[in-house]
């Protein structure tokens, strides 16, 4: 799980079951607009249930933040990148296992050697 440091998977599963049973049995959220993830998060906050469902709240916040963050990044990258740079980034993404195993020091030295503007005498 990518966000294992933020969300406890076991507790998250139990919280989802509890939330579902509360929603089904008591119709606690009927007066709230819980047709979307935003509505569900608002309902949990308004009904002061954040302490009862902390992992659900964190998961909803992550879920709701990702599209905005990705949109901002994509907008910035599109305005500052050319096709060659995008191709390089896509190769890094596709070959991420190899990229993770690279030594940063060697990559930095190699880059510095290629981009060196001083002439060694």
Image (cartoon, rainbow, N blue to C red):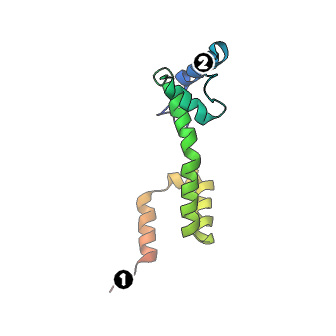
Compare marks 2 and 1 and give the one earlier in the sequence: 2
Residue that appears at 57% across and 19% down: 14
Residue 1 image point, x, y percent: 56, 35
Q: Which residue is mark 2?
A: 28
Label 1 neighbourhood size at 10 Å, few (<14), some (14-19), many (20+)? few
Residue that appears at 51% across and 52% down: 101
Residue that appears at 54% across and 57% down: 73
Examine the rendering and report whether any part of residue 13 can be seen.
Answer: yes
Which quarter of the rendering shows the C terminus? bottom left
Query: Eyeballing the image, is 64 above or below 50?
Result: below
Residue 48 image point, x, y percent: 47, 23
Check disc 1 and report its element: helix, strand or loop: loop
Is residue 114 left or right of 63 when viewed as pictured?
left
- The reply to whether discs 2 and 1 touch (Cβ–Cβ < 8 Å) is no
Check disc 2 and report its element: helix, strand or loop: loop
Q: Which residue is mark 1?
A: 118
- Residue nearer the viewer, 49 or 80: 49
């Amino acid at each position: 799980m990518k966000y294992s440091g933020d969300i406890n998977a076991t507790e998250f599963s139990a919280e989802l079951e509890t939330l579902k049973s509360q929603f089904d049995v008591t119709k606690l959220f009927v007066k709230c607009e819980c047709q979307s993830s935003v509505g569900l998060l608002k309902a949990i906050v308004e009904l002061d249930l954040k302490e009862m469902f902390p992992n659900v709240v964190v998961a909803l916040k992550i879920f709701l933040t990702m599209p905005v963050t990705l949109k901002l990044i994509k907008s910035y990258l599109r305005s500052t990148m050319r096709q060659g740079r995008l191709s390089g980034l896509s190769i890094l993404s596709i070959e991420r296992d190899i990229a993770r195993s690279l030594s940063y020091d060697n990559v930095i030295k190699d880059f510095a050697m290629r981009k060196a503007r001083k002439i060694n005498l």
